[in-house]
Image (cartoon, coloured by chain):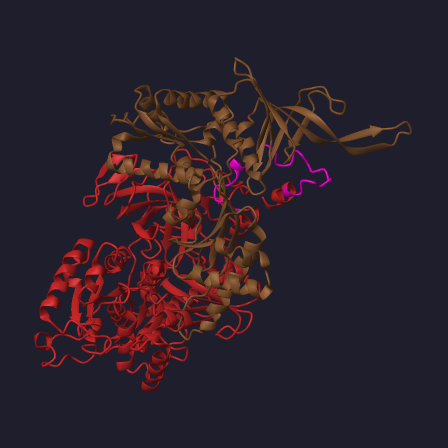
Amino acid sequence: MSRRRVKNIALNDDEDYDVDESFGHSFEDEPAFGVSPATASAYLFVRDKDTGGRITQPPLPDVKEEPPQSAPAPQMARLHVATAGPAHSVKVGFAGAVAVSPSVPSPSPRLLSTKQQQQQQAASSASNSRSASPAPPRKNGADPDSAGGDSTEASATEAYKRYCAGLGDRAMINLVIIGHVDAGKSTLIGHLLYLLGAVSQKVIHRYEQECRKAGKPSFQFAWVLDESEEERQRGVTMDVARSQLSTPHRLVNLLDCPGHKDFIPNMISGAMAADAALLVINATRGEFESGFDQGGQTREHALLARGLGIGQLVVAINKMDTAKWSETRFAEIRDKLGVYLKSVGFKPDCVSYCPVSGLEGANLNKPLSAELCPWYASGPTLVDLIDRLTPPPRSVDKPLRFYISEVSTGGRGTGGSGAVTCFGNALSGYAAPGHKLLLLPANQRITVKAVTSSGQDASAAAGPAIFAGDSGTISVSGGGVDPAHFGPGSVLSSVTMPCPCTNRLRAKLLLINVSQPVTKGYQAIFHQQAVSVPVTIIRLLAQINKSTGQLERRHPRYILSNCCAEVELQLDRPLCLDVYTNSRELGKFMLRDRGVTVAAGTVLCY
Amino acid sequence: MRLIHKDINKDRSGQVTLLPENPEDMWHAYNLVRVGDRLRSTTLRKVTTENAAGTVSSQKQRTTLTVLVESVYFDVQGCSLQVKGRNAEENAYVKMGAYHTIDLELQRKFTIVKDEWDSVSLDRVDEATDIARHADLSAIVMQEGLGHICLITSSMTLVRCRVEVNVPKKRKGFQSSQLDKAMQRFYEQLYQGLNKHINFGIVKCVILASPGFTKDDFYEYCFRQAVKEDNKVLIENKPKFVLVHSSSGHRQALKEVLEDPNIANKLADTRAALEVKALADFYSMLKSDPSRAFYGVKHVEMANENHAIEVLLISDSLFRSNKIEERRRFVKLVDSVRENAGQVRIFSSLHPSGEQLNQLTGVAAILRFPMHEPDDSDIDDDYGPTDGDGNGLDYPTNAAS
């Protein structure tokens, strides 16, 4: 395409250009998403006629595999369907009837929660537990990769045993802090870190002086997390800040999100990695009301949190000192929120409330004194409530999926110069140095050089490794690796069970708030984990009843708010996603348009 | 475009001679020239001559050729039109029936001879030769790490340049200087793109749109740089810059930019704004009273039979179909709507609203009174204009690769 363009601009060129070369194709025939041949070859996808023109992954290089015997077969078969035949040219058109087999749920995964893991370790030997879990089929010995892979599989549970032992009896949990702008999220967390000793008194003192000089007194705690110049200058959090704190029973990874409407994409990428949420509410009269209105972020954040699968919520009603710790105000806010959260889908027993003051530090880790707040004197502190959150089961046994949200090349870091360091979350599985992994969607083999994890230091006895549920970095050795292939949205996955990657998918959407009816051709932005990609709705397949799941209408002409529908989506570029039943994190997405969240969706098949 | 000569007979055949002056005129020409017409224009032909000694020499010869059009190709980025066909008139250098490709050039007139000038084509000639010059706008939509530089004319929205830079996010132990460096790199590339692609002579207004504070930062960066490099053109055009809020940096944000009230008065009577408004009206009608908003060929034709159409929204890609029956069908639809005192809005496929209408099968209508929707079960799901093989017509897109 670029070749053509250069020739056309050179109108006065006396060279005779080849008239017949690719003539007769108007610009209307070009691929709809404007992929140049260079980009297409970088992604190495083939359009397969059998699957109705959707992009499927090419066959994996060099991995000899015995045909998968068990239920994963249909899912794997789809990936290898393009083994025969040359690459078809990328053709766009409305596909005819697409024969898509319904998604087959993977065999019941052995999601080992920490407790079960410990019991298992006590009861049986490592090899027994390994054979019990649905290990991906591997050839014995002949495959050089799986030779290393076998031993790593066996040592997976060993390492996990040691990792859990290293954590003590503390489970790890990822907590995201959400709430309307100026609710006091950053200040609350900063103060909490200070009280629990993660930040020294000297640092706070220094920040206090700096912010007074800058004309923003009382921001000293927020500055613990808002580190960039611009955030400090403007007094807003713009991007998700990470930190860690330890409570008596939990090791908590904190993700402080921006509250501004414009930064919601950043908030989505932060919330995707979380297991529970801390919703911060401003109790000041007038502020709560404006935050809770239709335009405020309290509702939208709660909705997004629910839509992204977060089930547990701690509501911290902040700035109670301005509301003079009045019980009526607290009760009023709690009731209003309770109704709303229930309608959004949070179960009432998974939501807990507590009054706090982030700036003063009241009720954060020390309980309130009776004179200050008689009606709550014996209630749990914020740290107590965080401690009670239950971490979800970690699917360490599933094939590795490490989702990359950031890439940096060379420089300091565990890899040394020339290496590529990927920051991200492990969604499932386990990775350690020496493992061979597959980078998608670029379809490259890489070897892990070094690993750091938020769950432990590199010097921990368990040895460096990253498990499902951790965030951390994976450094990849420099030789033969092209840093351009790495980027946010790429997934490092196990070689034998790679992560599916596609640009056309069938999904179930729950429309939340659309200003205009959704028809064929509706364009929005698709947010999944750390990436956002423009998307078009190609077909409306069916309208489904929200609560019963019954089919209401086939091929509706349009869909309105608060309806549930099955649609076919086409993305502008291929993304790594998976069916929702296989992988919750990769199968969930949000659609946003014009700054408003339009729909929450799950992937049905691709 | 200037109209040089127009000669239409009673049986609707005839010829029109036009002189294109700017790239947008090429887009109008692309919508006029169809397969089966004849195009006469001056062009270069490579002529080989053999002299007495037997040596063969070839040279470029400029000549006027009439070509029976077989295919038409339009390059969006370069706005050039190439018409391929067989020679239909005797010529000193080219045999009858020999193939030739005419590359239409600016400032050189061409003549289109058609067997049937329908109302839509004649309207387009009128529109193209309209003297009033509409505003040309330039818009830069951006977000952290992604930016599009676009040119909006009355019938085209072209993405001139796309800048994508990997900007690292915050993380623990984070060096804020890394983020700043990456953003500076991003602004630098945008700045260069701005200087290269935006012609400040034509453009009346430069819109900077982004969520958050990116646009303000870029604005400051831009003029700091301009002062540093002593870029007089940019400094003189400073008042043309307008800062607008958008929800993202993707191409779709252009729609929001066009709807913004601050910009609306600058656009005023531009087609882009009218189209966006018409489509928004359609969607709001679809939401409030679905039986008064139809889309799809069969539905709209049925509504037309009952004289129910008040506003017809139709995409110009339907009139570019190669099959004359298709074109006639849509022209008939347009004519009958006009006869029934309805309004017709023809959407340009290069505007974002036109693209959206294309996805919605290309034709939609707002009705005067509610009508019962025809049964959907006997209508094929993916209907719409098709080419001879039964494949769906690929609608034009406007992606900068």
Quarter where residue A369 is shown: bottom left
Q: Is residue A20 magenta?
A: yes
Q: Which chain is red?
A: A
Question: Residue A108, how many percent across, how many down?
Answer: 28, 55
Name the one closer to the observer, B280 or B387.
B280
Question: Residue A165, how many percent across, how many down?
Answer: 30, 77
Is residue A491 visible in this depiction of the protein?
no
| Residue ID at (45%, 50%) | A574
Q: Colour of chain B?
A: brown
Q: Which residues are magenta?
A: A9-35
Question: Residue B181, how many percent across, how many down?
Answer: 50, 68
Q: Is residue B99 magenta?
A: no
Look at the picture and state if A95 lies above or below A118.
Answer: above
Task: Determine whether, in the image, residue A360 is placed left or right of residue B115.
Answer: left
Residue farthest top in this picture: B10
Task: Determine whether, in the image, residue B355 is placed left or right of residue A283.
Answer: right
Residue farthest bottom in this picture: A202
Question: Residue A316, how many percent across, how many down?
Answer: 20, 69
Name the one closer to the observer, A241 or A419.
A241
| Residue ID at (37%, 20%) | B339
Most common secondary structure along the magenta stretch: loop
Name the one closer to the observer, A33 or A125.
A33
| Residue ID at (11%, 66%) | A331
